[in-house]
Image (tube, rainbow, N blue to C red):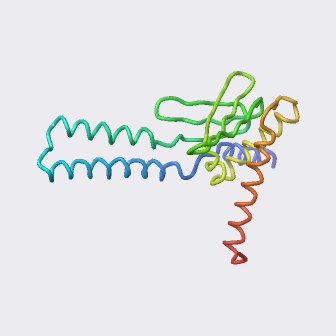
Amino acid sequence: MAPRNDTLEQRHAVAHDLRWARDVRDSVRSAGVLLALLMLMDWGSGRLTPWRSALWLALGLLLFIVLYPARVSAGKGWLASRGLLREHRVHTDLLVSVRCLGGVSQRLVLRDSVGGRAEIDPDVLLRNPRLWLLVEAGARKATADGMLLCGATALRRLSRRIDGETARAVFSASGLE
C-alpha cells in the first residue's frame, strides 16, 4: 500500500501556475491589438512606411516582453520562476528572507541560504492553492530550522489573505455569500 501512496505523491509533487497559458495569450493579444491599431492608424493617414512598420513591430514586441508572465512552479522544497530568458530557483526549505515589495504591481521576493532568489507575483499563489501549500510547507520548515530570518510577518500576512480569499470563494460557490 505504501508504494501506491508514494507513486500518487510523486505524481502530484510538482504544481504549476494554472493560469499561465491564459496570461501568455492575453500578453499576445494586447501586443497584437496595439500593433494592429498603430499600423491601421498609419495606413489610414497614408504615412505607413517600412521603417514605421518596423518601429511599430518593435513597440508591439516590447509590450509583449513587458507583459510576458513568469511561469511559476513548485515542488517539495523548491520554487521556480521562469521568464523569457532564464529560470530563477529557490529552495523554500532553506529560505532566509521573504519580502513583499509594493508599487504598481506587488512582488514577493524569496531568498535562500545558497544564494537562490526568485521574484513572483503573490496573486499566482492566491490563484493556485497547490503552489501555495508547497511554498508554505517549505517556509514552515525553514522557520522551524531557524533559517528564516526576515519575512515571517510577510508570509503570515499572505497566508491570511489567501485563507480569506479561499473562504470567500467557498462561500460564493456554495451560495452562502
Q: Nearer the viewer, residue 94 or 96?
A: 96
In the rendered image, which quarter is residue 72 located in? top right
**Residue shown at the point (75%, 24%) measured from the top left:** 113
Residue 42: image x %, image y %? 18, 48
At 15% from the left and 53% from the top, the residue drawn is 44
Frontmost residue, 45 versus 34: 45
**Horizontal side, residue 120 vs residue 167: left or right:** left
The C terminus appears in which quarter of the rendering? bottom right
Q: Residue furthest left?
A: 46
Quarter holding residue 79: top right
Residue 93: quarter of image:
top right
* x and y, in percent, of residue 170 in the image: 71, 68
In the displayed orientation, state which residue is furthest to the bottom.
175
Q: Is residue 76 left or right of residue 73?
A: right
Residue at image coords 63%, 42% = 102
Total tally of numbered discs in the picture = 0
> In the depicted view, which residue is nearer to us: 177 or 55?
55
Q: Position of residue 167 (x, y in %)?
A: 74, 64
Residue 27 located left or right of residue 131: left
- In the image, what residue occupies the spot 84% across and 35% down? 143
